[in-house]
Amino acid sequence: MVKIGIIDNYDVCCEIDTIEDSDWDYARNKYVLIRNGIIEYSTSSFDAPIMTDLGVMHGGNRDFPWQGLLIGPVNNKIYRVLDALYYRPLDAEDLKPLSIIARRDSADYIYVDEDLKEYVVTISVNFREGEAILSAHAKRPSIFLPILDIREAESGAQPSHRVHEERGVLIVGSNAAPIMLRINGFDFVKRLDLALEWVYKLDDGWRRLENGRVLFIKHVGKVQAPVALISEKGMLEIKVPLPGIRVKRVEFNVRYALRRLHSALKETSPNLSPQIINAILLRVDRLASFGVPLGPKLAPEAGSMWFRRVWTRDLLEGLRWNMLTYTEIFGSSAWFIDLVRYLILTAYRNNGLKVFVDVGDYVSDAFPQLINVVAMLYERTRERILLRESMKIMLEAYRRLRSPSGFSGCYLYDGLIVCDANSSWLDVFYPIDNVLWPTRLPLNWVGAVSPKDKFALVEVNSLFIECLCTLIEVLERIGEKPPKELYEFRSELLYGYRRWFLRDDALPPITIDPISGLRDYTRSSLGVVSVASLRGIIYDGKRLIALWDDIERLLVRRKMVKLDDGYEIFGILVRDVERRPYLGDLEYHGSVVWPRDTPYLIEVMKELGMEREIYGILINNLDHMVSEGAIGYVNELFSLPIGENPSPTKEYSSNPVPVKNYAQYWSHWCDPYIEYFCQKRNKRDFL
């Protein structure tokens, strides 16, 4: 049970039940996720009491060792601080969990005691200049139990904690992280020295097969609770000083934005049910939770847990499919312009863009997406400097692509952009005979090509063509003649695409080795991205109709749980390969669904006039967001419901199974909702 409510000040609240969902080995459990800048706190909605010398303490369960209190990135590190914060009232022994009411940055954990008296603990997170803060407030005198795990979240270290009191403040340090906690608000300290072995039943989201059953690989972690803290006022504040963090905050003015959006939804889509309207508002509200320091700027991170850093391609995909929301709903055009100009400057200085903007390996798909985003942003803001700077960097990219140095790991070869096979978002390697083989390349290419060769990737070539066409079109429209080099570049890539990729009645091959002529004709969402990017450039309505049968074979449907009860299209397979359950890296980009692909599918369907089907996709993705996983957020990917379900309990066991990270930025697209439900027919402008 999840109920979404909008209170008077336009805080969007979710009331979440406290029942575990054992379907597919607890893959559909509901999570509470509260976030603010570099700090996040998350638990299961399921209460997991523990026995102590002070009685039974309560708190939300943790299914991942990445839950609890996380802070980061701080100097590119992500720190786990608390496994959880537990509590109980001083004047009661027996608590029964009732529900949780979650907002973007706070949550009320609601219980009733043996006298049927309500006990509510509000946990909130805040990030301000120089410190991150977790606060707990109960309306009754309480015992708080901070379960400590202060370490680098990616280290797997077993920390030893140091605890001492200093002028009414508890100082907590660790040998596994250079951060310190300052805890206040308590009246008494009780030494417990409690050691726990916690079973994280979903661990990092990887799975295994056991006698045909599909099970998550569990992890047992050791955590510590050295002390309990008694607070007569029922409050506790945990501060983490971060003196090195200085970043300009961006105020999205979310409440005003949601008020306007609510009015627009009711005016332009009067037949929408209140629960669907509230779900759309929830999605837009939670988008505002993404944003961490990126150098001197603030930029959306890739997601929750291990994705708390800014990943370049995730950032640009998210900016593309949330541009309308940021500029027209949140009114944050200045921040958006400043951020993309920073990315252009970074690309210029670093000869391209890398996995973490200016750190890591070069990525091939991010730069053309950046130019797409900049050109589209100009269309909304009319900020001329965007065109000047994007034109300058595009000319520099063209020059370097033709040189031995390349640009962003890419080169021009025979009308194609060629690059490493793993340089786009299908980036996983798999060991084969002691050789790391990119999972993007077909296994029957082993021995025919080297994994270190350069390949033409369909989405990279398509994004380059799209950004060139868009940039040239915008320049021509404002009466500014584009440099001839841009026309040459566009012509060269159009020739290469038509020669190597274009097929009359099928999706394009996704990978080409131009030396041997090998083509991978696997049906894929990558081909759909290509077609969507080049609609109106290479793919007209006639071609789209001809290849729809190919796309339809990739579609995955899902039965709705909360917002409706029918089956609708949910998403699209990454690759049409052998149907197998997601277990790990080998299946990561196989017969699985990534919501990051869905906006491209919607664009193709728009061209084909499939309004009813688009509605189904939009509502179905909202339905996932409010019925499973981190409520209000969208999962990284979904496995097909294949293999033996160890605990089939629901009529929706045949739905795609959420796996891996439960809150992903590039899955959290909002613009398709605004465009479908809030814009006047035949007009671009948001009401």
Image (tube, helix red, strand yellow):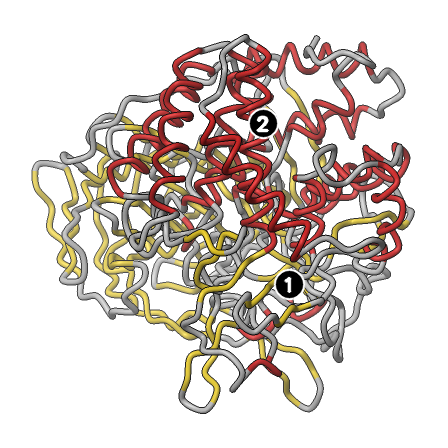
According to the picture, the residue beneath numbered tag 1 turns out to be 27
How many marks the image carries: the answer is 2
Q: Residue 309 at what x, y percent from top left? A: 36, 46
Q: Residue at x 42, y 25 (%)?
A: 391
**Relative to 640, residue 267 above or below:** above
Q: Earlier in the sequence, mark 1 or mark 2?
A: 1
Across and down, in percent, residue 526 comes to: 65, 54
Instruction: Let me know if residue 112 appears in the view.
Output: no
The amino acid type of the residue labelled 1 equals Ala
Callout 2: 10 Å neighbours few (<14), some, many (20+)?
some
Which of the 4 image quadrants contains residue 23? bottom right
Q: Mark 1 and 2 residues: CB-CB less than 8 Å, in contact?
A: no
x then y, percent, for residue 538 = 72, 40
Expressed as whole percent of the image width and height from the top left, the position of residue 626 reads 69, 42
In the displayed structure image, the side of residue 532 where residue 311 appears, left or right: left
Q: Which residue is mark 2?
A: 470
- Report the amino acid beneath label 2: Thr
Dot 1 falls on a residue whose secondary structure is loop
Horizontal side, residue 588 vs residue 313: left or right: right
Residue 649: mark in rendering: none
Is the N terminus in the top left, top right, bottom left or bottom right quadrant?
top right
**Which of the two residues, 189 or 604, is positioned nearer the viewer here?**
604
Q: Is residue 125 visible?
A: yes
- x 27%, y 66%: residue: 155
Q: Is residue 568 left or right of residue 463?
A: right
Can you tell which of label 1 and label 2 is closer to the viewer?
A: 2
Vertical order, 8 against 231 (above or below): above
In the rendered image, the vertical position of residue 569 relative to residue 54, given as above or below: above
Residue at disc 2, secondary structure: helix
Mark 1 packing: few (<14 Cα in 10 Å), some, or many (20+)?
Answer: many
